[in-house]
Image (spheres, helix red, strand yellow):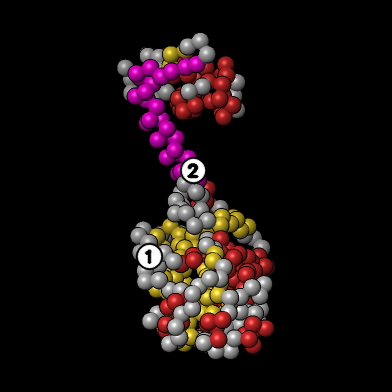
Amino acid sequence: MSDRLPPLTALRAFEAAARHMSFQKAAEELNVTPAALSFQIKSLEEHLGHPVFRRLNRAVELTEAGRALAPGTTDGFTALSAAWRNVRRFTDQTHLTVTAGPAFTAKWLAPRLYEFARAHPEIELRFSASLRRMDFDRDAVDVAIRFGRGPYDGMYALPLTEEWVTPVMVPDLAEQFPTPESLRDATLISDQSIDFLDPTVGWTEWFETMGVPSPELTGPKFSQADHAVDAALAGVGVCLGRRSVVIKDLADGRLVAPFKIALLVGARFSFLCPDGMESRPHIAAFRDWILSEIEKTRDVAESFELREPA
């Protein structure tokens, strides 16, 4: 028997039919008629010299030869699809797909995107607000912005700003709570999005650093940082705000931070992309824009004294 491969269309028909275990569903996926798909599979069987399916009354099942062939064809077409996506991404400099967490997307990226769009009208941005671990090839993502300590092996990883937390509130509340001691009587909003860090950095650690006994934390608790900040913007109470999520509201005066002590959290955001792709024009443009936006609020950030948690 010759080692010459059968036609790619026949292998594609077999792979889809084996995956669905249905000629009808495979034909619909490949946008061909069931008769055309059946013809391709018959040509594959003639090339092989053995049947790969048993045709039953209302179903099909793989023969021993079909079971041996199915995993390799699935892996092969998966690899081909990944390679094709990669080469398309390499040659496409007009679309940029970015993934970042929901809070960073809502509070850092979204309010600033007009500036990027104005500076780079040739680049169409696409966003995926997600915290899950991304596969750049599988998910067709160009850039990921992720929070943590790293390391990010095999990637281009550019650390962004240091992340810290400090109490933030609307200006009216700042008049009611002028001292750290008075904050014990405020409604304290808890942002639980960084509770996974060890050591933890929260209200208890902030009060201890300020030399004030921590009150019982009975205020609202949020799993997403942007939701906690939105509650503070609505005047619900005082939030221990993360730099990345509150810095623009501080710069624009919607929130104030009366106590110029901020606690370092020991982790930061990083700009990530596949190693070697950082020099692609659209990726480099997005990276440089992020760095320039960070510079715009550097004076606000540098007004705080940074401390390690007590």
Q: Which percent across, then down, holds residue 44?
A: 44, 19
* Residue ID at (56%, 57%): 129
Residue 177 seen from this side: yes
Quadrant showing the C terminus: bottom left
Residue 84: assigned label = 2
Quadrant showing the N terminus: top left
The answer to whether 64 appears left or right of 111 in the picture is left
- Alpha carbon separation for disc pair 1 and 2: 30 Å
Residue type marked 2: Trp
Residue type marked 1: Gly
The residues colored magenta run 59-86
* Residue ID at (49%, 75%): 216
Whether residue 90 appears in magenta in the rendering, the answer is no
Q: Secondary structure at mark 1?
A: loop
Q: Secondary structure at mark 2?
A: helix
Q: Which percent across, then down, holds residue 198?
A: 37, 69
Whether residue 78 appears in magenta in the rendering, the answer is yes
The answer to whether 233 appears left or right of 96 in the picture is right
Q: Label 1, on which residue? A: 150
Residue 264 seen from this side: no
